[in-house]
Image (cartoon, grey):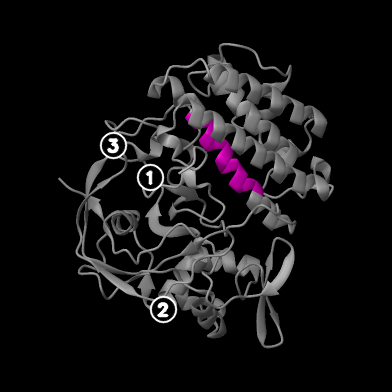
């Protein structure tokens, strides 16, 4: 495994240097896709809740690394930075905790060339400082944090390209999920150590802290992801018009959307087609369905006589499961609300998890756009229920010993 694909959690100085350079190169290549379409100026980007102006997002990734590494801040509180920014208005422009989303379209940002110069200067200084750091988890923590943060924004850049109908970079070569036969796997259940351990060293996100016993009853889950063909059956059975399959919140969302199929699906004659980075292509029937929000995932499961797995069931299957159990093609919704684990305390990046508890939902896995160094069966992604960029892997209700029991803390 190369230094840029090895897990960032235990990466040492040279591995981190290679990965940070790789992440920045990728970020810049994504930004160039917007520039090529004339969308490097915020005024040309539609103001949508699920995207940021690309120029702001580019500057924010560099600012974040500067804040935690060069400015040696011990938290995301404005008073905790030990040194000023390289930019006189850096904090006023790029601090996501204090710059409201709606205002990011009207900031007096530097030119694209000026922001890219800032990115290069920050990275050069970061790599120089990294070269003099000891190979300890404490010293390397802010570098690992900045790397994970930039990788996540790289994925955000990619779904912004999809949202705006723009082309993806030519080097993105992983948009071809593995074909897998449909198969059901029965899991015996047992006590799972949910979360990440604090005694193994390396980087841990605050929402993974810390391991705690969680009982998982026996269950059966599909080995592979729900396909377009399977979801198409739901659509063509009138699934979007049948209220009995939708939760109250889902029905409210559906009424406002007037949707009869997943986002980006289009019917042409008797054939379904889909928009993929601005190009209309035939919808592959075998490919895992994508761009579903939580409401659509739940409605499909209700129609199919299934349900979404809990977070604990998904982790149990991924860690102790059958070799046929596949994940890492697309993010997968779970049935679990995003809540803190017992004893949760926020880490240095205080806004990473805590503001979203109770109003977001847990997803597990990874997508084709997730750098392999970021992927982990322990990593909980979290999104609002209306976000529709992901997919589902349902578990059979009939195969669970106690269909109403959720995974729970053991005494």
Q: Residues within 10 Å of mark 1 (few under 14, many from 20)?
A: some
In the image, taking residue 34 as reference, residue 316 lies left or right, namely: left
Q: Residues within 10 Å of mark 3 (few under 14, many from 20)?
A: some
Q: Position of residue 178 (x, y in %)?
A: 49, 67
Q: What is the distance, in whole Å, between disc 1 and disc 3 at their CAs?
A: 18 Å
In the image, taking residue 364 as reference, residue 117 lies left or right, namely: right
Q: Residue at x 49, y 41 (%)?
A: 2
Residue 197, numbered circle: 3
Q: Is residue 77 above or below residue 356?
A: above
**Which residue is farthest bottom?**
270
Q: Secondary structure at mark 2?
A: helix
Q: Nearer the viewer, residue 181 or 279?
A: 181
* Labels 2, 1: front one: 2
Residue 339, numbered circle: 1
Is residue 18 shown in magenta?
Answer: no
- Predominant SS along the magenta part: helix
Is residue 150 shown in magenta?
Answer: yes
Q: Nearer the viewer, residue 23 or 251?
A: 23
Position of the C terminus by quadrant? top left
Asked if marks 2 and 3 touch (Cβ < 8 Å), the reply is no
Position of the N terminus by quadrant? top left
In the image, taking residue 402 as reference, residue 13 lies left or right, namely: right
Asked if residue 409 can be seen in this view, the reply is: yes
Q: What is the distance, in whole Å, between disc 2 and disc 3 at their CAs?
A: 37 Å
Q: Give, as a single range, the part of the protein colored magenta.
A: 144-157
Q: Residue at x 70, y 45 (%)?
A: 30
The residue tagged 2 is 304
Q: Position of residue 400 (x, y in %)?
A: 24, 70
Quadrant in the picture for residue 257 = bottom right
Q: Position of residue 123 (x, y in %)?
A: 64, 25
């Amino acid at each position: 495994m190369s230094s840029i694909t090895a897990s960032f959690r235990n990466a040492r100085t040279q591995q981190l240097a290679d990965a940070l350079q790789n992440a920045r190169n990728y970020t810049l290549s994504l930004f160039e896709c917007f520039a090529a379409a004339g969308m490097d100026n915020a005024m040309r980007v539609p103001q949508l809740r699920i995207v940021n102006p690309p120029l702001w997002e580019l500057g924010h990734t560099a600012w974040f690394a500067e804040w935690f590494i060069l400015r040696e801040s011990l938290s995301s509180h404005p008073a905790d930075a030990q040194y000023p920014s390289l930019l006189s208005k850096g904090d006023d422009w790029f601090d996501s905790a204090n710059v409201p989303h709606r205002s990011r379209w009207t900031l007096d940002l530097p030119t694209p060339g000026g922001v890219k110069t800032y990115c290069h200067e920050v990275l050069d200084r970061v790599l120089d400082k990294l070269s003099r750091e000891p190979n300890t988890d404490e010293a390397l923590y802010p570098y690992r944090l900045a790397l994970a943060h930039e990788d996540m924004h790289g994925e955000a850049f990619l779904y912004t390209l999809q949202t705006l109908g723009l082309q993806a970079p030519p080097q993105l070569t992983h948009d071809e999920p593995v074909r897998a036969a449909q198969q059901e796997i029965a899991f015996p259940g047992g006590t799972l150590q949910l979360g990440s351990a604090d005694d193994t060293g390396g980087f841990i996100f605050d929402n993974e802290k810390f391991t705690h016993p969680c009982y998982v009853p026996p269950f059966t889950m599909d080995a592979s992801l729900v396909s377009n063909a399977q979801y198409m059956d739901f659509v063509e059975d009138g699934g979007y018009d049948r209220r009995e399959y939708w939760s109250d919140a889902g029905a409210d969302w559906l009424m406002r959307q007037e949707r009869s199929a997943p986002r980006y699906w289009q019917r042409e004659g008797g054939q379904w087609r889909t928009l993929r980075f601005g190009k209309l292509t035939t919808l592959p029937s075998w490919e895992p369905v994508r761009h579903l929000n939580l409401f659509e995932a739940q409605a499909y499961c209700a129609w199919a006589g299934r349900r979404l797995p809990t977070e604990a069931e998904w982790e149990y299957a991924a860690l102790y499961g059958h070799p046929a159990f596949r994940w890492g093609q697309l993010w997968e919704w779970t049935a679990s609300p995003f809540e803190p684990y017992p004893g949760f305390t926020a880490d240095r990046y205080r806004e990473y998890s805590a503001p979203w508890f109770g109003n977001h939902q847990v997803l597990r896995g990874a997508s084709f756009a997730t750098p392999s160094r970021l992927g982990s069966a322990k990593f909980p992604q979290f999104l609002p229920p209306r976000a529709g960029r992901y997919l589902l892997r349902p578990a059979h209700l009939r195969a669970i010993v106690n269909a109403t029991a959720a995974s729970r803390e053991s005494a």
